[in-house]
Amino acid sequence: MELRTLRYFLAVADELHFGRAAARLHVAQSALSAQVKQLENEVGLVLLDRSTRHVELSEAGRRFREHALRITGAASNAEADMRALAQGLTGRVSVGFVGTATYDVLPQVARRVHDELPDVELVLRGELLSPELYAGIESGTFDLALLRPGAARDGVRLRPLRTERLVAALPSRHRLATGETVALADLASEAFVIHPSGDHSSMHDQVLAACGRAGFRPARLVEVGETATLVVFVAAGLGVALVPEPVRSLAVAGATYVQLADPETVDLALASRTGEPSAAAARVARIIGETVRD
Amino acid sequence: MELRTLRYFLAVADELHFGRAAARLHVAQSALSAQVKQLENEVGLVLLDRSTRHVELSEAGRRFREHALRITGAASNAEADMRALAQGLTGRVSVGFVGTATYDVLPQVARRVHDELPDVELVLRGELLSPELYAGIESGTFDLALLRPGAARDGVRLRPLRTERLVAALPSRHRLATGETVALADLASEAFVIHPSGDHSSMHDQVLAACGRAGFRPARLVEVGETATLVVFVAAGLGVALVPEPVRSLAVAGATYVQLADPETVDLALASRTGEPSAAAARVARIIGETVRD
DNA sequence: TAAAAATACTCCATAGGTATTTTAT
DNA sequence: ATAAAATACCTATGGAGTATTTTTA
């Protein structure tokens, strides 16, 4: 039993006329007759009661028609689904994010994917550290990752997205919180709320490097994993923090973001596995690129 | 896309090894490789990530596998169902009965079909007159009919089942109800409860013919369609009746069946359409034959 | 008698086989 | 070095076409 045979049978069952059915299928009437006959031999039942003047479905034919419709329908579904998958209109894309991208890029991307690619399942994991994301891309856990680019690793392709200025997050009551800008050196004696150092967090290292360039080393460090928690700690007066400018979209009462006088920046990049990504992943990558650009 | 291709793909997806899958399918490895490759071309996606040392399903392959399983599963279902249909183990069989077979043959047949052919749907219509049954067989409304054989009609095949003796149904209080037998002539002056004459009921005619042979013509006729109602009327004292002996299984308080001294009989036959009946109808016919024989 | 399905036959596309090459570990 | 998939090439099955016959309403 083959799908072609079933399609032939269904055409005859539809037209109740071998000639017309053959025309519809673009095959000769004789080929159609032969195929239907073979199908009947296979199932061991007469499916069509036919004379030269009349064709009608037998009881068995009516029953078989239901089966044939189910089978060819499932095949059509499969074809349609695979076509959609090939075009990136369906499928699953898992994306990992560093914490500082979680509150800015992530929600916009999720919204656009939901609107433009409703059948694409987006699996999001935010608040991860760049090394974890590198490993996730290599191992296939993630199709895409938004991370702070570090040493190139082969198996991972990096595309620079943008450079983000660092801003200071200060308690609103802080004496420097009302200024237009703040010089990093003026924060030398403050406690710093900072991402954890473990596993080589990129933000941890870059904040300390910036302080170093400003001529000091923070006296006290309060390590906090989640970006949201970090800002809340600042708001609570536990210290100051340096965060990429897009974190501003995370508004927390009691915390104020102030532009740095120093030109400190961190890079944001999109990572993917080398080789052909899935069509859906490519579409999501494109949306991420457009979202960041705007 | 053809079922063969899907089965090949599923074998490889199962074995994750082209050589073993080919062996399982009894085809050469090269043929399998070619078919899988062609399938991938058709769907436009790589379904299997493979090297000479390792074969695994791609994301698209996992997705396609679900489709392929659904499709081939539906095809297997179809084959199994058609096989069962060809063997008469499934399908629908409609059977019509004359009223006097309704209470005897019908329940036994229904029970046996239910037990022995659980997937055969038995559609029963009882309490019909033989001419209606003839027409129903010819028109295809019924696959089988239990009826009183009359003039042969072509398009209808008749198989004699048995000859049933007529017995008298008398009100229990009737003076003749206690005898071992009753002579028909002794009922000459009674009112007769009888099946309707309309549409040439066979029982109607045969009861009157029997009376004629006994030398009388019933003084009064009470016409009743249903056999059960007929016996109830007798029990109520509205008259006497002649019924085929199997109607005895219809026990009604107040009515007594008494053997006739006269050797009057009616025939019961199984009617079916000429030509090949469905396998299920043939099985049911066989069960009817066996049931009546016992 | 005419329309339509079945049959006879021929052809060729393609599934499948054998032998060999390529490739990744 | 070797196991296994891919490739090259050949064969043959069977699907499809043309022409004709058969059938029945």
Image: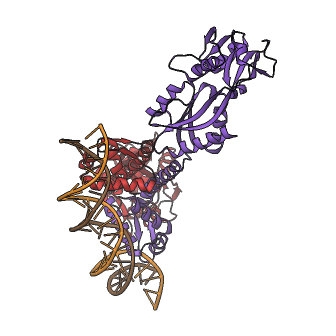
Chain colours: A red, B purple, C brown, D orange
Nearest the eye: B172 or A283:
B172
Residue at left 76%, top 17%? B253
Nearest the eye: D15 or A193:
D15
Is A137 rendered above or below residue A244? below
Total labels drawn: 0
Nearest the eye: B11 or B154:
B154
How far across and how far down the image is residue A38, in percent? 38, 56
Which of the 4 image quarters holds residue B190? top right
Is B201 rendered above or below residue A81? above
Nearest the eye: B122 or B179:
B179
Residue at left 34%, top 50%? A7
State which quarter of the image contains the N terminus of chain A.
bottom left
Residue A165 visible? The answer is no
How far across and how far down the image is residue A34, in percent? 32, 56
Residue B43 visible? The answer is yes
Determine whether, in the image, residue A285 is placed left or right of residue B157. left
Is B233 rendered above or below residue A24? above
Is B186 rendered above or below residue B134? above
How far across and how far down the image is residue B150, in percent? 53, 29
How far across and how far down the image is residue A95, in percent? 42, 55
Determine whether, in the image, residue D3 is placed left or right of residue B196. left
